[in-house]
Amino acid sequence: MLDVALDHHRNGRLVQAQAGYAQILQFDEKNFDALHLLGVLAQQIGKPQGAVEFIGRAIAINRKEPFAHFNLANALVELGRTQEAVASYDRAIALQPNYVDALINRGDALRQLLRFDDALTNFDKAIKLSPDDARAHSNRSIALAFLGRNQEALEAGEKAIALRPDFPQAYVNRGNARHVQRDYAGARADFDQALALQPQYPAAYFNRGNVALEQNQLDDALANYDAALAIWPTYPEALAVRAQVLAALGRPAEALESDDRAIAANPAFAAAYSHRILMLQAQESTTGAALLNAAKAYGATFGRLALPPFRAARKPGQRLRIGFVSGDLRGRPVGHFIAPLFTHYDRTALEVFCYDTARRDDTLTETLRGQVDHWRCIAVMSDEAAAQMIRHDKIDVLIDLAGHTGDARLPLFAHRAAAVQVSWLGYWSTTGLPQMDHVLTDAITVPSGEEALFTENVVHLPQTRSCYAAPADAPAPAAPPSVATGTITFGSFNTLAKIGPDVVSLWAAVLNAVPGSRLLLKSNTLDAAEAREWILAAFAQAGIAADRLDLRAASPHAEMLAAYADVDIALDPFPLGGGLTSCEALWMGVPVVTLAGRLAGGRQTEGFLRTIGLPGLVAADRDAYVGIAVDLARNPERLAALHADLRPRMAASPLCDGPNFARAFETAMRGLCTPK
């Protein structure tokens, strides 16, 4: 009976094979072969959970068959249970030390866990056992690329292709190695060759999409992710990155749906959970309770403590060691807002460590690196390895600057690398992570009475949660352009992810209330045809013709700041408001009208305005928002005065007082480390 079922299985008659194995189990429920093969079949038809269940039952009967542990590990990888998969590969290799496929797959699993050195060791062992295994050489190229050994990575990829010129995966892996080196043309050529060999290859489309995304070609990226998903509808990584593209194109509701699909496909996908939580905050209907529940669900999934609590021994008066974890220590909002602290902190009071989770340096990165005591790159380190490094550095307070935003490494904090762990700056709401002890904020962002919306203890800085350092390349503020043109121009330089239907409706009301006025939108995604079409269609539906819109794509930072000379009044989006964008508008002399936020993410601009003494630009409701904008538009003298006064007003306020902010931050750190 088993032979007949096997024959069906080998010849692709899977329904008949499944029936045959099931029939065997009716007579012998502990038949190892039938259980194991049912598991293999389940994985073949896209049911990895069933594979885990059947193969697990088989292993309970016979734990000494290496191929069963190997197949179980493969199913666990597909479910995102990668750490468990490594343990299963270990059992397979312990039973059969020369198991080349298990060594290669174990290396792949370790690569997914960012343990690139360990992955490389497995690929090298496989090659020693089987020198002509193209897959081992191909996967070795990826590990080498992430370790920065670029020439070796290319050589390994070329070796794999020389061994098997018809091996699509070798081209995909070499393409990824080229992508890491920013050889975009070479990477695209490799992905195209993989698709020429295997047209139904979702990973090739996915990686083509990644190259397009890095080059800000959002239409192309989305088309490639959709092509990958047409072949593999539950491709978790494609669904998750597609969600990011949809958000950037101004389609947050669709982004949320794509995140949900990614999580359903891989319940252990931390990045998809984080992006979903971010997208919830872009929905006008999201309540504080709903956001808290989503964050708690994240914490329940990823907040498992892997290491025991750790506390560094500090003598009274000894410098505190403060660690910052971020992937945005560059020309991004976090980089600009952290700069005043790094410039002015007291070196006798604090010893600062930066743990960089990205490898995208720029000129601001170089400046920040030169201002702090220690700089570590953990971009290609696993959470466990990074936590051990941080413990070795004896950090007193470990601060996360990302939360649920891009390049988040919140699972690292679940390993309790420091006794005191804090969320700050790059994120504003609760993380939901049980090991995150405090959130550093201010009384405007999180007013009294909203502490219950946080799983962390809420700590208020005395005046503002952030400090702004004006860029040296900022041109002087210009007079309102309406002085010369006679036409009021409203503007927003925020990402399209924040401009949903409700925002379009309110901004259309503003435009309609000021006859002849125009709206200038500038965003790094507006060079994408789909994004432009969406914006034009949305405003057309709200009664605003295309000739009243000025859509501009990304430009170098100094040019972007200079473009504020074309804006009379800036409009803040909601429910997620501007951060750095609002500070830059104000510094360029352009008043920003904002709607008082229901949640912390909608109060950043309100905080800036109240801190610089302009609470009158904060609207209590939508009617008031329109009223404030219209009053400014109809009062050219006040508008001109604001354009001239905003920069000196900001410079004299706590928002730009770096030394005072640094003292407040140091006091907060000492308070967090003082036994209660």
Image (cartoon, grey):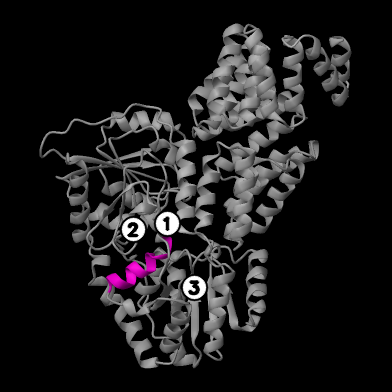
Question: Quadrant location of the N terminus?
Answer: top right
Q: In this view, does 508 lie above or below 79?
A: below
The image position of residue 34, as x and y in percent, is 77, 13
**Element type at mark 2:** helix
Towards the viewer: 473 or 63:
63
Say whether marks 3 and 2 touch (CB < 8 Å): no
Residue at which label 1 appears: 332
Which residue occupies 57% across, 80% down?
Answer: 508
Q: Distance between the residues labelled 1 and 2?
A: 9 Å
Q: Which of marks 1 and 3 is nearer the N terminus?
A: 1
Q: Earlier in the sequence, mark 1 or mark 2?
A: 1
**Element type at mark 3:** strand
Residue at which label 3 appears: 492
Q: Residues within 10 Å of mark 1 (few under 14, many from 20)?
A: some
- Magenta stretch bounds: 601-612
Q: Is residue 338 above or below residue 59?
A: below
Q: Is residue 105 above or below residue 442?
A: above
Disc 2 marks a residue whose amino acid type is: Phe
Disc 1 marks a residue whose amino acid type is: Arg
Q: Is residue 246 left or right of residue 162?
A: left
Q: In this view, does 70 lie to the left or right of 636?
A: right
Q: Distance between the residues labelled 1 and 3?
A: 17 Å
The image position of residue 581, as x and y in percent, is 42, 67
Residue at which label 2 appears: 337
Q: Distance between the residues labelled 3 and 2?
A: 20 Å
The image position of residue 65, as x and y in percent, is 66, 8
